[in-house]
């Protein structure tokens, strides 16, 4: 069977037309089952991230509170105390990547005298404005900008107490997103669990991943967006003790595109000393595109800009808005397929041979990350998310409709086998539920492959989970409950369930959902603290092994499931 990742790739960068993008995702969602690169799946989910990120914030106190100060290597910063913690917002970790620094590795920030205010959210990376960003958003963040290399810190106190540090990578498929998004606000995690939360903004899209190193002389970087994250991690290692964090106990974690970034960090030699454990959530990037593909993408970008390789210095002068137009139009017109082994990948992390020397998990786990515990898992109903913003036809399909939709990817005896397998595994499921189960299961399949690779390393443990809470909120215009779709974990693991409920995905305020949030946030904080996810009122979570494949079933009442959906797992194994 041939892969269809290039079809999905046509959607990933189309952030100016989110509804059209999501409709296209639904039409292509079955491509997941045909071996598509997981990064494509990750990116598509957040074409509508503005709605997701604007939902479910902590209750923010009105008015300014007491100001607290902390020292960094570059100067002192002043944060604000509110909601029972201290927030340092917009702390520079690198120099603005402007002018001649565009497409280059990040440089250290300039030192300053006096005390710098760090009380407002910084500019998100350059991208299409909307949602929470800029004058057309809800006002939480300023407009996107190239001057974006800042991070936010939520801490119980800037007191040198050496608390666990939770360094979160925001989602958005390398294309959109922000370390200031409401749903992932670190206030509740910091206050409830006595941890320090750090989130960075970093270059995205063309500005973060256009690779010119093989087309021009000079010091053009590969994976400059990942180098930004590396610089933010290094800053955290060097300075976080002054903010109440432990530089010797740093967890990196992220969901969707942020999970892909976390997997890349797990594979970067220069990050080895900068973190100690990781969690890869709703993402399973076994492979990344190649250096050759990134170079081919750069050549195509130059053509669209009307430039040759000798004109590369002009890229420093082209307005960022023009680069964004090219980035988006290329995706919209279908000339930038995304996938592996497709020779023309989209903008995102790739195997360059040095910064990222290998694929994350397709050929085992990097030896230098052997001692780092890992969490990995998915939401139970990931692909439901991709159909939430289009006419609800798919939620009403009958058996014939199920076969019709699946036939976009599977044919003949294989189509019969997959339908029969999932009917047997889930005998009470409706045709629509089977459709989403079948299109979600490859994500879980590849998460299992990550866990198996970590088990085979025989070093640090790996812990597997599924978010299984069945959110009863129905898709508008249907009687279909959304269950646990992609991105539904964000607010839960950050314990952000009390405000900004304008997006129906987060409207459920039932005791069951609130209990799930308590369990999930406590487990993640427990993993940050000890390298083993522990929490009160939750069963002991054993490490994953090939013998019992123990998996935490995250719900209002958590339980450990042995080898969940075994027949479905075996179906994928036998198909490989």
Image (cartoon, helix red, strand yellow):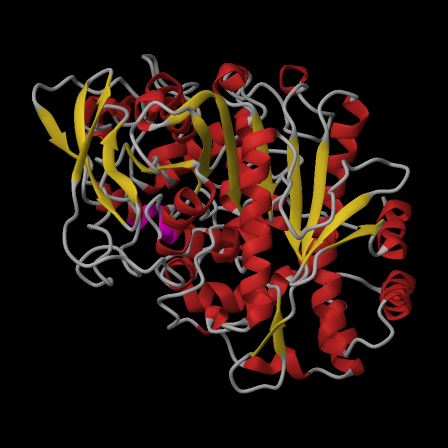
On screen, residue 216 above or below 51: above
In the rendered image, the residue lying farthest to the top is 218
Point out residue 187 in the picture as x, y percentages from the top left corner.
36, 48
297 or 56, which lies in front?
56
> In the rendered image, which quarter contains the C terminus?
top right
Q: Main SS type for the magenta part?
A: helix
Question: Picture quarter containing residue 61?
Answer: bottom left
Residue at 36% x, 61% y is 54
From this view, report whether residue 268 is shown above or below residue 182: above
The answer to whether residue 290 is visible is no
Q: Is residue 157 left or right of residue 393?
A: left
Residue 327 highlighted magenta (yes or no): yes
Q: Taking 98 as reference, is 357 left or right?
A: right
Task: Decide if residue 399 is on the left or right side of residue 227.
Answer: right
Give the x, y percent position of residue 92.
24, 29
Residue 191 percent coordinates (x, y): 39, 45
Q: Is residue 366 left or right of residue 100?
A: right
Decide which of 470, 173 is in the foreground and name it: 470
Q: What residue is shown at x 71% (from left), y 76% (from top)?
A: 432
* Residue 116 shown in magenta: no
Give x and y (percent) for residue 276.
55, 23
For the view shown, which residue lies furthest in the left direction?
114
Give the total of numbered labels.
Answer: 0
Front-most of residues 73 and 264: 73
Magenta-colored span: 325-329
Can residue 12 be seen in the rendering of this structure?
yes
Above or below: residue 360 compared with residue 191: above
């Amino acid at each position: 069977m041939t892969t269809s990742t290039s079809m999905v790739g046509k959607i990933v960068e189309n952030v100016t037309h989110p509804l059209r993008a999501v409709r296209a995702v639904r039409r292509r969602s079955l491509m997941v089952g045909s071996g598509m690169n997981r990064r494509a799946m990750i990116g598509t989910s957040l074409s509508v991230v503005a709605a997701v990120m604007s939902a479910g914030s902590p209750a923010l106190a009105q008015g300014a509170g007491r100001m607290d100060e902390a020292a960094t290597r570059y100067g002192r910063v002043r944060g604000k105390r509110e909601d029972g913690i201290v927030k340092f917002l917009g702390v520079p970790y690198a120099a603005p990547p402007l002018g001649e620094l565009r497409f280059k590795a990040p440089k250290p920030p300039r030192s300053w005298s006096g005390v710098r205010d760090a009380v407002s959210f910084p500019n998100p990376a350059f991208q299409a404005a909307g949602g929470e960003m800029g004058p057309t958003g809800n006002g939480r963040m300023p407009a996107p900008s190239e001057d974006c290399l800042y991070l936010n810190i939520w801490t119980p106190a800037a007191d040198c107490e050496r608390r666990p540090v939770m360094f979160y990578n925001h989602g958005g498929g390398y294309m959109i997103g922000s370390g200031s998004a409401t749903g992932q606000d670190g206030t509740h995690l910091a206050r409830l669990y006595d941890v320090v939360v750090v989130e960075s903004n970093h270059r995205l899209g063309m500005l973060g991943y256009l690779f010119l190193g093989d087309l021009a002389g000079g010091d053009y970087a590969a994976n400059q967006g990942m180098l930004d994250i590396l610089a933010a991690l290094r800053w955290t290692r060097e300075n976080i003790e002054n903010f109440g964090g432990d530089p010797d106990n740093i967890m990196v974690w992220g969901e969707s595109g942020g999970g892909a970034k976390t997997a890349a960090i797990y594979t970067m030699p220069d990050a080895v000393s900068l973190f100690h454990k990781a969690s890869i959530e709703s993402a399973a990037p076994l492979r990344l595109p190649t250096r050759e593909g990134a170079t081919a993408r750069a050549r195509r970008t130059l053509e669209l800009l009307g430039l040759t390789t000798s004109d590369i210095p002009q890229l420093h002068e082209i307005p960022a808005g023009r680069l964004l137009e090219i980035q988006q139009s290329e995706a919209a017109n279908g000339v930038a397929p995304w996938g592996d082994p497709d020779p023309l990948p989209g903008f995102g992390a790739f195997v360059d041979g040095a910064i990222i020397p290998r694929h994350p998990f397709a050929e085992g786990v990097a030896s230098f990350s052997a001692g780092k515990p890992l969490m990995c898992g998915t939401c139970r109903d990931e692909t439901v998310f991709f159909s939430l913003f289009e006419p609800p036809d798919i939620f009403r399909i009958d058996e014939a409709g199920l076969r019709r939709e699946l036939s976009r990817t599977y044919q003949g005896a294989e189509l019969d086998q997959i339908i029969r397998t999932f009917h047997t595994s889930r005998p009470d499921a409706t045709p629509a539920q089977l459709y989403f189960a079948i299109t979600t299961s490859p994500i879980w399949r590849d998460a299992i492959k990550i866990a198996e690779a970590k088990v085979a390393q025989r070093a640090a443990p790996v812990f597997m989970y599924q978010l299984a809470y069945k959110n009863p909120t129905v898709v508008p215009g249907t009687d279909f409950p959304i269950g646990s779709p992609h991105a539904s974990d964000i607010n839960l693991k950050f314990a952000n369930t009390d405000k900004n409920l304008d997006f129906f995905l987060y409207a459920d305020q039932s005791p069951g959902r609130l209990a799930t949030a308590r369990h999930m946030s406590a487990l993640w904080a427990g993993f940050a603290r000890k390298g083993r996810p522990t929490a009160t009122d939750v069963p002991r979570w054993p490490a994953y092994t090939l013998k019992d494949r123990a998996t935490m079933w995250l719900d209002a009442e958590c339980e450990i499931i042995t080898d969940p959906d075994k027949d479905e797992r075996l179906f994928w194994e036998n198909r490989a």
